[in-house]
Image: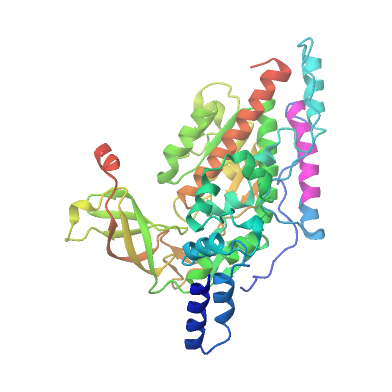
Amino acid sequence: MRLPQPVNNTVPGPAMPFSPTTTLNMATLGKKLFILSVRMGRGLWHRGIVSSSNPVQSAVEPLEKLQESSSDAITEQMAKSLKYPDFFKVAELFTVEDLFNARVHLGHREGSLNDHMSQFIFGSRLSHLIFDLDQTATLLREALNFTAHIAFRGGIILFVGRIPQHQVMIENTAKECGEYAHTRYWQGGVLTNSTIQFGSVIRLPDLIIFLHTMNNVIYEHTAIRDAAKMLIPTVGIVDTNCNPNLITYPVPGNDDSAASISLFCNLFKAAILRGKEKRKELLGVH
Amino acid sequence: ATLTMAAVRAQTKFLSTNVLIKPFFSRFCASGSGQEAGEGASQVKKVNQESGQDGSQIKKVEPGGFAKSFIKYTQSSSSKVSEEAPKPSRTFSSLLRNSKLIQLGDPEGKVVEGTVFHVVENDLYIDFGSKFYCVCHRPQRNAQSYVRGARVRLRLHELELSTRFLGSSTDMTLLEADATLLGLIHPPKKTESAKQ
């Protein structure tokens, strides 16, 4: 197998700075997790990742239940939850072997490779690209951890995907975890012109999860650029022909097989449900 | 015992190579302890019962191949866990190296098995374990058996139909594999076809 040469050595980080106009909770959360993710990203190159199909477990001391549910106490609990590297133990949700069996490592051909994705490629087999599942596993754990934290804090999560075969699967996933999905034609101003389009002040989603970053054809989904404009963090499954640059937590992997999309849907659903469970348990809020 | 030893000697006369003598000796020799079973299972059992080599071993019966696997698979899980060593974690590199994709090599001309997961009039959408599915036309022969859940045999041509067209900077992909339908292996189970 011949390794395609990486064009740039840096892991794509979040594209937008966190402005003080966003809510205090989201900004501080975003900053802390951004720092964690960048450190992780640089670390990918400098230390050899021991690949294993067993999940990485981290010891977590549980937080105590809140005695009084005042807003200060809630904020304090939320801040404490950030001290743990894997507060919701999302690493237990999957192994590298699970990803392998769900065909997550299969990429497109070399001819349709986006240069920014070459850092995530293990190699190519007779011009068919293979993802490095060790990198995928690390980035997926980061994405699931972030998703669970957003759900813990009561954020609105929007699932987006534009491939018709997986539309129903994505909508059902959103239904089952009590969140939202948009798998139809994306009208231009949904995020950027929401006040006029919907006729009232709109609370925008706090996280957008892309199961497919491309539209049916060659174009990237409009919501990626718009989410970056509106300072909404994004998690996205990026295939070899996708551009991971504007996505906050890219997860390199196969987005064309039903098996891999169903695995990702189940993982995100599990992470969100864990976050909500902890929210109910520790913060006493629904 | 003497009968079996004679049989061994007779056999070894016909075997010119030294390689084959050892396994035969170990199989028919009474000193061999619980060898790998299979063909010689019943004979091993017999020999151990009859041999008077060790006084304490006369009554002991070594289980044959079937008996061993029966014990292994009907034993309770708790005893299994204590006996077996923990499974070594499989790395991505080893999983890939031993995967079907690598074993396949060049997909052109390879025969694989697939499952029909969707049918649109006379088009069958068949998944054979790769990134993409393939779409084949329903054949004339045995047409009513090609329904959702049917297992079919395919001859692969391409794993992904994608190529560079003149004037474009990247490949254009059809998001499909290319294969020829060879025939049916299994019609779907009755419960599945009843649901349809």
Residue at image point 46% right, 59% down? B130
The part of the image, by quadrant, that contains residue A223 is top right
The foreground one among A238 and A99 is: A99
Q: How is the image coloured?
A: rainbow
- The residue range painted magenta reads A25-40
Q: Is residue A90 above or below residue A130?
A: above
Q: Residue A73 appears at what percent x and percent y? A: 81, 16
Q: Is residue A26 magenta?
A: yes
Please name whichever residue, B80 or A22, is drawn nearer the observer in this view of the structure: B80
**How many numbered badges does the structure rendering display?**
0
Residue at image location 68% in from the left, 38% down from the top: A90
| Residue placed most toward the observer, A56 or B174 | A56
Answer whether residue A183 is visible to the viewer in this image. Answer: no
Q: Is residue A124 above or below residue A264?
A: below
Q: Which residue reaches farthest bottom? A: B16
Residue B131 image point, x, y percent: 47, 58
For this view, does B44 lie left or right of residue A64?
left
> Is residue A168 left or right of B149 when viewed as pictured?
right
Residue B139 visible somewhere in the drawing: yes
In the image, what residue occupies the spot 48% across and 82% down?
A: B11
Q: Quadrant of residue B191?
A: top left
Q: Main secondary structure of the magenta part?
A: helix
Q: Is residue A89 above or below residue B121?
A: above
In the picture, the quarter occupied by the C terminus of chain A is top right
| Residue A12 percent coordinates (x, y) | 71, 53
Does residue A262 appear left or right of residue A12 in this picture? left
Q: Tell which residue pokes out farthest to the top in this image.
A: A68
Give the x, y percent position of residue B74: 52, 43
Residue nearest the viewer, comparing B42 with B56: B56
> In the image, what residue occupies the spot 29% across and 60% down?
B136
